[in-house]
Amino acid sequence: MSEEQERTLLQRLGLPLAVVAFLLPIVLQPDGLDAAGHRMFGIFLAAIVLWITEAVPLYATAVLIIFGEILFISEASVMPLPEGFEAPPIDDFYSALANPVLMLFLGGFFLAEGAAKYRLDRNLARVLLRPFGTSPTGIMLGLMLITAALSMFMSNTATAATMTAVVLSVTATLPPGDRLRTSLALSIPIAANVGGIATPVGTPPNAIALAGLTERGISISFLEWMLATLPFVILILVAAWWLLGRLHRSETKELKLEMEGEFDMSRPAILFYGVFALTIALWLTEPLHGVPATVVGFLPVVVLLSTQVFGVTELQNVRWDVLWLVGGGIALATGMAAAGVDEWLVALVAWENLPVALLLVVLAVISLALSTTISNSATANLLVPIGLTLAMSDAVAVDPLLAGIIIAVGCSLAMALPISTPPNAIAYATGAVRTKDLAVVGLLVGAIGLVLFLAVAPLWWNLLGIAGM
C-alpha cells in the first residue's frame, strides 16, 4: 500500500473513530468528571482523532469543536447540564474567533500578503544577499538568515514559497548530481520553521501559546518574546547551516546570483512599505508606547483596507483557515477549563514526583514528537491548555510562561517529515529533497534546538526576568 493510499484509508476511518472517541467518555463516565466533563472530554478526544487523521480539514475540526461545546456544555446545551455546573454563555465560544491574538496574527497575514503583492520579500532578498558574496556556503547562510528574518513577521509558508523560488533559480545553474542543490533546498524550510519561533506572529503555535497565557492573565510583550527566543534562533540557524554544509558537501566553489528586479515605487506600494515598517517598529517598541501588540496588529488591516491598497481579492487571500484553527484551539481551552477537564487530566499523573527540569523535558519532547506527525498548530491546540493548567497547579512549581514557550518551541522544531510543516511540503515538492534527507536533517536540527532551549533558555529567561525555573 502506498503512502497516499494509507493516508486516504486513515482519513476514511477518521470520522467513525472520532464519533467513537466522543461517545467513549459519555458511556464509560470516568470518575472525577460530571456529565458536562464527560462531554467535553469526548470533544477533546474527537478533536485529537480528527487532527491526527485529517478526516476533515484542520480548520473544520476547529469549528466542530466550537459547535460541539455550544451544543453540549454551554447555556444553550441541547442536553441537560449537571446541577451546580456554571454553563458558559455561547458568546464565550464564538468570541474565540475574534480573540485579540487572532487580530495580531491577522496583521501578520496582511503584511505577508502585501509583501508578496508588491514583491517586497523577493526584492529584500535580492538586496540583502549581496553582502554574502558568491561562495556556496556564504550564499546558503545568507538565504537562511533572510528566510528566518522574513518568517519572523510573515507567514512561514509564504516566506518558504518565495525563498524556494529564489533557490530554484540559483540551483538551476548547478551540474546534475551536485549535493549543493539538496542543501540549499533544505535550508529554506529549516530557516522558515526556526525563524518563526522568534516572534508571536511567526507561527501558529506561538499565537496559541500567547492566547493561552493571556486567558490566564499572563502577559508577555512582542519585544520580550523576541528577547526570549531570538538568541537561540540565531544559534540554531548557525548550527543547521554548519550541519547542512557537512552532510551535503559540494565541489562547486562559486555561485552567481542573477536576481533582477526593482522596488515597486507606485503610490500603493510606498504606502504599504510605510505601514509594514511602522507596524514592525510599533511591535518592537511596545514597552515604550504601551500599545498592545494585538492592537498594533490591527493597524495594517485598517489602514490597507481604508486606503484601498488592499481590496476584496487581498482580503480573500488571507489565511482565514489558520485563524480559525487557532480560534478553535482557544475555544477548546475555554471549554476544558469550564468543564474541569484540564485539571482532571493533570491530576491523573503524579507530577509532583518529577523534577522541574524533567517535567520541561517531557513537555518539550511530547510537543516535538506529536508535531512531527500532525500539524504543529493542532499539537499546540491540544497541549497548551494541559501544559498551562499543569504549570499553574499546586503539584509543580513551573512558571506558566516558561511552559507555554517551551511547548510552542517544541512544536515549531518538528520538521522531520514533509507533512510536519507547510515549508517542508514546499521543499519536498521541488523534487530536490528526498524524505530521507528531510528526516535526517530535521531530526538533528530539532534535537539540537530542543537541547539548546532546555539547557540554556530557562537560565537566560530568568536573567531577563521574563520567566524562570
Image (tube, rainbow, N blue to C red):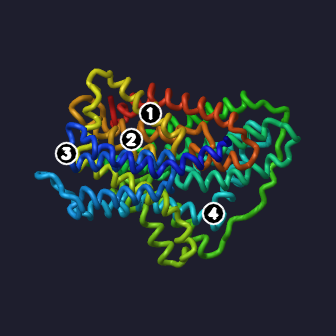
x%, y% of residue 96?
34, 59
Q: Which label belongs to residue 34?
A: 3
Residue drawn at point x = 47 percent, y = 62 percent: 107
Depth check, mark 1 against mark 3: the one in front is: 3
Task: Indicate the amino acid at tag 4.
Answer: Ala
* Label 3, label 4: how far apart the Cα atoms are: 51 Å
**Does 248 sit left or right of 363 as displayed?**
right
Check disc 4 and report the residue beneath it.
116
Q: Is residue 455 above or below residue 392?
A: above
Q: Residue at x 56, y 71 (%)?
A: 314
Tell me residue 401's x, y (percent): 34, 39
Q: Nearer the viewer, mark 4 or mark 2?
A: 2
Residue 352 position, x and y percent, is 26, 24
Judge by depth and name the residue closer to the eye, 464 or 293.
293
The one nearer the camera, 297 or 211, is: 211
Dot 3 or dot 4, earlier in sequence? 3
Residue 69, compared with residue 4, is above or below; it is below
Q: CA distance from mark 1 to mark 3?
A: 28 Å
Q: Mark 2 or 3 closer to N-term?
A: 3
Helix, strand or loop status at disc 4: helix
> Is 344 positioned to the left or the right of 203 in the image?
left
Residue receiving disc 1: 366
Q: Is residue 208 left or right of residue 420?
A: left
Find the distance from the CA under tag 4 to the CA under tag 2.
Answer: 33 Å
> For mark 2, what is the residue?
383
Element assignment for label 3? loop
| Mark earlier in primary sequence (1, 2) | 1
